[in-house]
Image: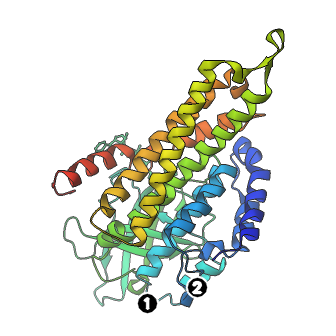
């Protein structure tokens, strides 16, 4: 179990710098330092590896709390955790200390999956990995299009077409920032999640084969069975954390802002109340869906795949709707930076286009429930 006090401390640090991180497009360094010292970077890492051994429900609670304070911090945390669970599932034999370093906060991780060539189709990297003749090293060449915490993370989990040479097979490798051949190509300047440092990176490195996660060609299975459930739950939690922040700010604003000539608050307007009711009920339904999806990932059954596919897409879309309503309900005030609403609105635009994108997930969901193969 994590310490609530430690989480609240990280949340307060993240909240205090959220506006500056957003305005300057600055990496949330203070919040990441607080995370490193909180134990939370090892939240779902098994206890025997130095983590807290928590499950999906606690994970989504922590991510949601962070997102309500600062979307960029939450996304950095999500990418670290997705990297850590993947390392836990298939630790690279040449890096025996890496998982405990990720759990303790000494090593921040991230995922370098999306590519210039295959775009959001992260399951189909066009980058290449070639084994040396003696089989000890791999020559890796990749153009990664978006890597959160680029240049700040200590460990990059990089996908590539497998050294097997078989089309559709994937390898995953762990690359330390300190190694050669990993370069940040350009600064990140996004409309939202502006502190993410989600820059393009190139990989041109010769690395030990022992830095591979799992056996040759095990990458696709890791992507689908480990990364997908944790990433989708966490990404849904980011969306709902942002939506929840906008919802709370909206209620505060319409309860306090007055129409003095009518001696009433904005909340006296029935249209405003109806909009708030739609926001609140959509949020409550999505939170309940996220709880059942997290429970289903904890104790898998025949519905788990549907939950994993459905929760990210629906939470992403709910966050779009709720933050858009918040912008409308709060009128011109929502454009101002004294409310977090316009930041929540911009940050929430990212979820639906983060891979697997909402559109792809709806297609996969439709395939899953009609008995068609996903690929
Ligand atoms: C803030 C941010 C941070 C990110 N961080 C990371 C990271 O740390 N690591 C990482 O690997 N990636 C990261 N990404 C990349 C992300 O996961 C996606 O790969 C990227 O946003 C896709 O953008 P694109 O322009 O390549 O989309 P495209 O693939 O060009 O998609 C364009 C549109 O086509 C739709 N589309 C594509 N294929 C299909 C299909 N088969 N069926 C239906 N619709 C389809 C998409 O839904 C989308 O609407 C990040 C993205 C953002 C915005």
Q: Residue at x 21, y 72 (%)?
A: 165
Question: Disc 2 beta carbon < 8 A from ligand 1?
Answer: no
Give how far apart the Cα atoms at labels 2 and 1 are.
14 Å
Q: Quadrant of residue 142?
A: bottom left
* Figure check: 347 above or below 69: above
Q: Pointer 1: residues within 10 angstroms few (<14), some, or many (20+)?
A: some
Mark whose residue sits in front, 2 or 1: 2
Find residue 182 and report its horizontal and vertical position in percent.
52, 67
Q: What label sits on residue 60 in the rendered view?
A: none
Say which quadrant the N terminus sits in. bottom right
Q: Residue at x 50, y 87 (%)?
A: 95
Looking at the picture, the colour scheme in use is: rainbow
Q: Quadrant of residue 131?
A: bottom left
Question: Disc 1 beta carbon < 8 A from ligand 1?
Answer: no
* Figure check: 101 above or below 140: below
Q: Circle 1 sits in a helix, a strand or a loop, which is it?
A: loop
Q: Pointer 2: residues within 10 angstroms few (<14), some, or many (20+)?
A: many
Q: Residue at x 47, y 46 (%)?
A: 315
How many marks are shown on the rendered structure? 2
Q: Along the horizontal axis of the image, is 307 left or right of 315?
A: left
Give the residue at mark 1: 93
Is there any visible trace of residue 91 in the rendered image? Answer: yes
Q: Along the horizontal axis of the image, is 140 left or right of 346?
A: left
Find residue 365 and report its horizontal and vertical position in percent.
28, 50
* Closer to us: 243 or 93: 243
Q: Residue at x 64, y 39 (%)?
A: 246
Q: Circle 2 sits in a helix, a strand or a loop, which is it?
A: helix
* Figure check: 346 above or below 364: above
Q: What label sits on residue 100 in the rendered view?
A: 2
């Amino acid at each position: 179990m994590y310490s609530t006090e430690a989480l609240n401390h990280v949340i307060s640090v993240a909240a205090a710098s959220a506006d500056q991180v957003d305005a300057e497009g600055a990496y949330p360094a203070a919040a990441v330092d607080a995370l490193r010292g909180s134990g939370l970077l090892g939240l779902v890492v098994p206890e025997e590896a130095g983590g807290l051994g928590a499950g999906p429900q606690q994970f989504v609670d922590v991510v949601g709390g962070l997102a309500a304070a600062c979307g960029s911090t939450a996304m950095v945390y999500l990418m670290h955790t997705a990297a850590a669970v993947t390392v836990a599932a298939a630790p690279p034999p040449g890096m025996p200390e890496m998982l405990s370093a990720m759990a303790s906060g000494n090593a921040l991780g991230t995922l370098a999956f999306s590519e210039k060539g295959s775009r959001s189709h992260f399951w189909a990297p066009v980058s290449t990995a070639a084994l040396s003749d003696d089989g000890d090293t791999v020559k890796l060449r990749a153009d990664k299009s978006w890597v959160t915490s680029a240049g700040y993370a200590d460990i990059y989990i990089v996908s590539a077409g497998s050294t097997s040479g078989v089309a559709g097979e994937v390898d995953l490798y762990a690359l330390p920032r300190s190694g050669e051949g990993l370069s940040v190509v350009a600064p990140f300047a996004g409309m939202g999640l502006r502190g993410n440092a989600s820059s393009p990176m190139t990989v041109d490195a010769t690395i030990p084969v022992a830095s591979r996660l799992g056996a040759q060609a095990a990458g696709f299975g890791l992507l689908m069975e480990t990364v997908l459930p944790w990433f989708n739950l966490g990404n849904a939690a980011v969306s709902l954390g942002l939506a929840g922040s906008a919802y709370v700010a909206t209620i505060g604003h319409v309860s306090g802002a007055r129409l003095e000539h009518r001696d009433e608050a904005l909340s006296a307007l029935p249209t405003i109340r109806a909009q708030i009711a739609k926001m609140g009920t959509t949020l409550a339904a999505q939170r309940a869906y996220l709880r059942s999806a997290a429970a289903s990932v904890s104790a898998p059954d025949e519905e788990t795949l549907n939950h994993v596919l459905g929760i990210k897409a629906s939470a992403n879309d709910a966050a779009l709707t709720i933050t858009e309503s918040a912008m409308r309900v709060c009128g011109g005030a929502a454009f101002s930076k004294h409310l977090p609403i316009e930041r929540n609105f911009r940050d929430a635009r990212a979820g639906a286009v983060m891979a697997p994108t909402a559109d792809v997930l709806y297609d996969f969901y439709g395939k899953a429930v009609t008995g068609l193969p996903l690929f």
